[in-house]
Image (cartoon, rainbow, N blue to C red):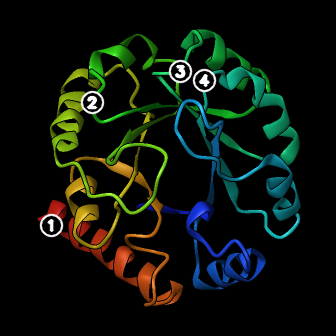
């Protein structure tokens, strides 16, 4: 079964509490927080104080996606705010071994993120250390972009490399996730999907959108069993 984590950057910021409650009622699995510094990407997103306030609303897992130059500066504050999983970019300015160690030291799960144009070989030295690997299927920083199909080949490449190296590694996809792109990713072993403006936050409503995404997962699972 797949996991859908709701990207709250795409929710109504004016009615964020309402949307969180609606997502919980619809059966969302997790909540996703984008942290941006305006430097690594040219945008500013959610702040850590907001995460701390929302922590009192639910016990569901919180994951934070750091689109920042120096992720080490944010880790302890995110732990205090109630985050369970921290993803940071392989393209960031700090040594990944060091950042992964800091995350683990806080008792959190660690994930690396790789941009569409970045060579997959860059993450190979860290495969054994991380709990998650997130593939950006759009360019990081802004919602509403088109799915980059070239990433599918990169996921296939990872499947060939990782055999026996970290069998518990969970794969994550972020960007343009909808009823068409989810099955292509799920059949390649992606476990966690970031639901944003393409498939979760639109006029169809959370209950209907989640049902559609889950149905696509069930279709993939049934095909794999045949």
Helix or strand or loop: what does disc 1 sit on?
helix
Q: Quadrant of residue 98?
A: top right
Give the vertical position of 42 relative to 206 (above or below): above
Query: On the image, numbered disc 3 is attached to which residue?
Result: 92
Dot label at residue 223? 1
- Residue at x 78%, y 63% (from the top left corner): 59
Dot label at residue 117? 2
Report x, y in % for residue 58.
79, 68
Does the CB distance between marks 3 and 4 fall below 8 Å?
yes
Labels 1 and 4: the sequence-earlier one: 4
Instruction: Specify whether residue 82 is in view.
Output: no
Q: Nearer the viewer, mark 1 or mark 4?
A: 4
61 lies left or right of 158: right
Q: Give the distance between the C-alpha atoms of the residues marked 1 and 3, in whole angstroms.
A: 38 Å
Give the vertical position of 159 relative to 219 (above or below): above
Quarter of the image for the N terminus: give it.
bottom left
């Amino acid at each position: 079964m797949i996991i859908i984590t709701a990207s709250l950057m795409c929710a109504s910021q004016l009615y964020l509490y309402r949307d969180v409650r609606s997502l919980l009622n619809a059966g969302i699995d997790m909540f996703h927080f984008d942290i941006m510094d305006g430097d690594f990407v040219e945008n500013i997103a959610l702040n850590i104080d907001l995460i701390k306030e929302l922590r009192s609303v639910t016990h569901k897992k919180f994951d934070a996606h750091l689109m920042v130059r120096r992720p080490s500066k944010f880790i302890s504050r995110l732990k205090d705010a109630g985050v369970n999983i921290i993803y940071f970019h392989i393209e960031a300015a700090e040594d990944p071994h060091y950042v992964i160690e800091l995350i683990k030291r806080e008792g959190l799960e660690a994930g690396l993120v790789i941009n569409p144009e970045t060579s997959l070989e860059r993450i190979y030295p860290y495969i054994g250390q991380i709990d998650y690997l997130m593939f950006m299927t759009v360019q990081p920083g802004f919602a509403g972009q088109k799915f980059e199909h070239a990433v599918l080949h990169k996921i296939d490449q990872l499947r060939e490399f990782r055999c026996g190296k970290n069998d518990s590694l969970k794969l994550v996809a972020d960007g343009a996730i909808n009823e068409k792109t989810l099955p292509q990713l799920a059949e390649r072993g992606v476990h966690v999907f970031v639901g944003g403006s393409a498939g979760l936050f639109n006029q169809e409503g959370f209950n209907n959108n989640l049902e559609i995404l889950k149905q696509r997962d069930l279709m993939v699972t049934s095909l794999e069993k045949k």
